[in-house]
Amino acid sequence: MAQFIALLVVLAVILAIVAIQWGVINADESAAQREKQLLDQELVALLGAHKRENERFAVGDEAYQNAHVQYSSEWVHRNMGQKLAQSFEHDLTILLNASLDPLYTANEGFVWLPEIYEQKLKSILSPTLRELQQEFQFSTIKRNDGFLASTDTSDGMLKPHTRSFLIEFDGRPALTALTTVTPESYTIPILDRRPCTLISIRVLNADFLAKISRKLGLHNLTFVPNGSTVPFSAQKQLVDQSGNPFGSLSWSPNTPGQDLWQQAAPIVYLAFSIILAVLILALRRMSAASRKLFESEAQARHSSLHDSLSGLPNRDLFERDLKSVLTQCQQTGEHIAVVYLDLDYFKEVNDTLGHQVGDELIRAVADRLRRAVNDEDTVARISGDEFVILFRTCRDKIDLRERCQSVVETFKEPFDLGSHRLFVTCSMGAVRAPIDGVEPGELIRRADVALYKAKEAGRERCIVFEPSMEDKLRQRRQIEAELREALERNQFRLCYQPQVSPDGRHTITVEALLRWHHPLKGTIPPSFFVPIAEGCEMIWKIGEWVLRQACRDGLNWPDISIAVNVSPAQVRHPEFASQIKRILREENFPPHKLELEVTEAVLMDQSDAALNTIEELRLIGVKLALDDFGTGFSSLSYLRKFPFGKFKIDRSFITSVEHEVEAAAVVHTLVGLGEALGMEVTAEGVETPGQHRFLQASRCTSLQGFYFARPMLARDITRRLQNEQKRPDNRVSA
Ligand code: C2E
Ligand code: CA
Ligand code: CA
């Protein structure tokens, strides 16, 4: 646009200059034309005057008498030659007789040799002279005064015949007049013979031309004979009486346009220079502005395609790059890989250490990932703690695993973020193209499916996509959706399984166990849907329901405690402690009758945050039990560090206790450990009388298992508790 405007302005300036020049030329041409007209008129006037001057001396009675009837050389000299020279500055005066021979010749008023006529004029003037003579048609008439006269007019007078024209004389133009000598009145008889002719010539010499120049305002008016170079640009051709050109008058014409232009030019050029300067300035401004615009556009383009936090390409740019790489691959037949990477427990970092630390961690991870891949590979951040990597070459599955492993390795080093030192791991899902897909969105989604698997398999690993994973994931998504509905449609129920005294007679605690009554699939066990609910954060809402329901039911059993299972995801939630407090308050349930069962998974990461939550709950009287003890890390330090009042020996040990010496030894050790730490110990999964006997002997504080009771509805617990009270000495059995 700017260039177009500039072009227009420059064009306008050029057009203006051309128009001015054209005006200048036009003005000069019309001035020259006018000068030519003036010169024309002047020559006509000069010839007219010259003719009249000649006639004045050629026409008259005395002139006719002395020149024609009775020739008097003296009279002719005085009255013709001298007078014409003195009064009118004629140069040559020649009187020719009827036979056209010179009677008298004078040059500038002095009698001259007649040869001048013969040599220089005769040949030029003869044709005109003959013409003049032929105009006389003498006839004899009787005049009014009674004389018979030879005449060419009807009134008996002789009419004078005159010509005036220009000729070239002695290399110069000359005014020439020829007049027949005739009388003026009747008083003189007219001879029956052709009259004499008076010739008078005035040369247009330099002085004369200068006079004309002055009069007409012409410059350097000069005569130029035929064949010579015309010195000035304006000229008027001169022709003789027969119309033959014999030279021209040339002069340097006035140039009013040029003159005006010369005066105006500096101002005009100054004006144009100013316009151009302004234009250049404006253009510069515009180009600077458009450069800025371009830069900010580029900036906007960059930010629209990059993640502002890490500076890495975003999903859009990644997909674009991936698309073009995939197109290339189709041509070259090469294989590439896409890896979906997710930080393990990033949410917890954010929740416990704040978003600023979370942001710093993302930047540090981005940096590390960039360094972990080759230059040609791409790393992009696609959301929160999720990254994608594009490996531009990938030989096979083994190669891909190795590359992913090297990325996992880079996370072994801790991240030092100001005052925090974090050990962060990552999980990855990988796909290969074109084997696992040829479309960017599809590849990323499948990599995400594999990532899901990696998370499920215990995190901090990379899993390569298999088509079967997708079906499982699809089922899982379906269950996730159904779980949401289940809560709204009241499809959950709680069962309670008693934990009894070592002798099996008294119920000490009941453990709430969740059941899902699916309208089509029937009752679904928690081992199936709880991990799915944990994966989609539904566990938070479901957990709330369980706690509330357990409290409500528990209010009916004032003498026993209620054990509620809580997932690590719940405990890790920063709001967990306040959620429990709120429910206890709202349901009016005594905190010391609530026991929370957590697994060791809670303790493995972010232990400080979990510790704080657990400590907070312990302070209000809530009891805590470590579930499934013996299956995880079973670290002694956990038991010492966390304020658990109880641990539950996992069913797997109890099952083998009757037959395997090692299992029995472990159980003994664990019970001893509980005693040493002042903790209660519950044995889970007691199914047989033998197991019961063994456990009773081993001093467990409580026992749980099908041998005593299966999980049952709340009303059955009520009945059972009533029975226990009625028959206190009877062993309670399922
Ligand atoms: P858990 O906490 O270890 O619960 C005990 C599980 O062992 C229950 O299975 C129970 O029915 C089963 N059981 C008890 N005695 C015996 C026995 O003698 N033999 C055998 N074979 N099994 C026995 P259930 O109800 O299917 O629960 C499975 C797991 O689901 C629970 O294991 C617990 O981890 C989880 N769970 C149950 N309800 C909830 C809940 O409300 N919230 C959370 N987060 N997890 C729950
Ligand atoms: Ca449990
Ligand atoms: Ca358990």
Image (tube, rainbow, N blue to C red):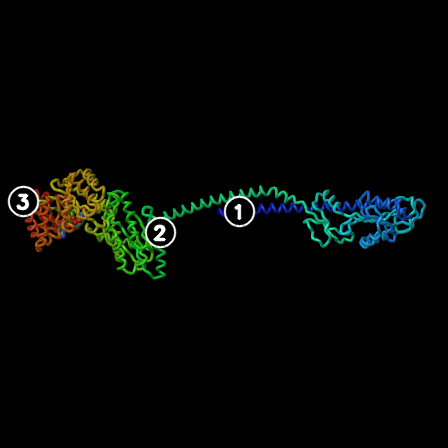
Q: Position of residue 577 (x, y in %)?
A: 20, 41
Q: Position of residue 285 (x, y in %)?
A: 47, 43
**Labels 3, 2: front one:** 2
Query: Label 2: few (<14), some or many (≥20) within 10 Å?
Result: some
Residue at 42% in and 45% down: 292
Asked if marks 3 and 2 touch (Cβ < 8 Å), the reply is no
Quickly name the residue at label 1.
8
Distance from label 3 to label 2 (Cα)?
75 Å
Residue toward you, 253 or 444: 253
Residue toward you, 685 or 368: 368
The quarter of the displayed image where residue 85 is located: top right
Badge 3 element: loop
Residue 734 at least partly seen: no
Q: Tell which circle, 1 or 2, labels the residue nearer the N-terminal end.
A: 1
What kind of residue is marked 2? Leu
What kind of residue is marked 3? Asp
Quickly name the residue at label 2.
317
Q: Position of residue 180 (x, y in %)?
A: 85, 49
Quickly name the residue at label 3.
729
Asked if marks 1 and 2 touch (Cβ < 8 Å), the reply is no
Distance from label 3 to label 1 (Cα)?
113 Å
